[in-house]
Image: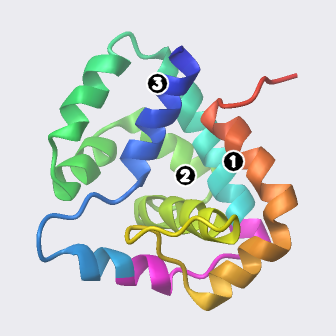
Amino acid sequence: MARVLSALLVAFISLPHPAAGQATTVQQEILDYQLTLPRANQLITAMESMTKYVMSLPDFQSRMARMAKMTAAERRAQVENDPKAMAILKQNNLTLQDYLVGVPALRMALMAAQGVKAPTVVASPANLAFAKANLAELKPKLDAADGMTARQ
């Protein structure tokens, strides 16, 4: 149960939740983000560390509830003001923008590659082709980073 909650929190932090009128900007950032195998692996490694970190917090469930009510700018500020979260990004050579846009771009490309069709799932043709070509390698890693699969 804790793994699922942490996966939801990490997913929630990294997925865009645009306010009215912002959807096209957020979607465009995701469409413009170019995935590569090294970048996808960086994002997944950072997600794994972020999941472990978030699960270690005694108040992670209440944090999730608070973050659900935050705007994108407030969530961004929350992460920027968290030295441990920023250190995780730095260790993985990622900027906050890379993480906040790259993780949803990767998730959505993999979802689209699996045939998920929803108005909120957007992927550029290049990212969709990338995801289809690398689905067998990346999907298990992403699931593990989310805490959805058992670790060895």
Q: Is label 2 in contact with label 1 (beta carbons under 8 Å)?
A: no
| Mark 2 vs 3, N-terminal side | 3
Task: Give the distance between the C-alpha atoms of the residues marked 2 and 3, in whole angstroms.
Answer: 25 Å
Along the viewing direction, whichever of 141 and 94 lies nearer the viewer: 141
How far is disc 1 from disc 3 in space, using C-alphas? 15 Å
Whole-percent x and y of residue 123? 54, 78
Q: Which mark is residue 86?
A: none
Residue under label 3, please give it: 5
| Mark 2: amino acid | Lys
The CA distance from mark 2 to mark 1 is 20 Å
Query: In this image, 40 relative to 21: left or right?
Result: right
Which SS class for mark 1? helix
Q: Secondary structure at mark 2?
A: helix
Q: Earlier in the sequence, mark 1 or mark 3?
A: 3
Please check the rendered image and state whether residue 43 is part of the magenta-colored stretch, yes or no. Answer: no
Depth check, front residue: 142 or 110: 110
**Residue 40, percent across and down?**
69, 63
Q: Name the residue that disc number 1 marks.
A: 142
Magenta stretch bounds: 28-39
**Dominant secondary structure, magenta:** helix
Amino acid carrying mark 3 in the image:
Leu
Q: Quarter-wise, where is residue 47 in the image?
A: top right
Answer few, some or many: residues within 10 Å of disc 1's Cα (few below 14, many 20 plus, some between 14 and 19): many
The residue pinned by badge 2 equals 90
**Crowdedness of circle 3 by 10 Å Cα count: few (<14), some, many (20+)?**
some
Colour approach in the figure:
rainbow
Q: Residue furthest bottom?
A: 125
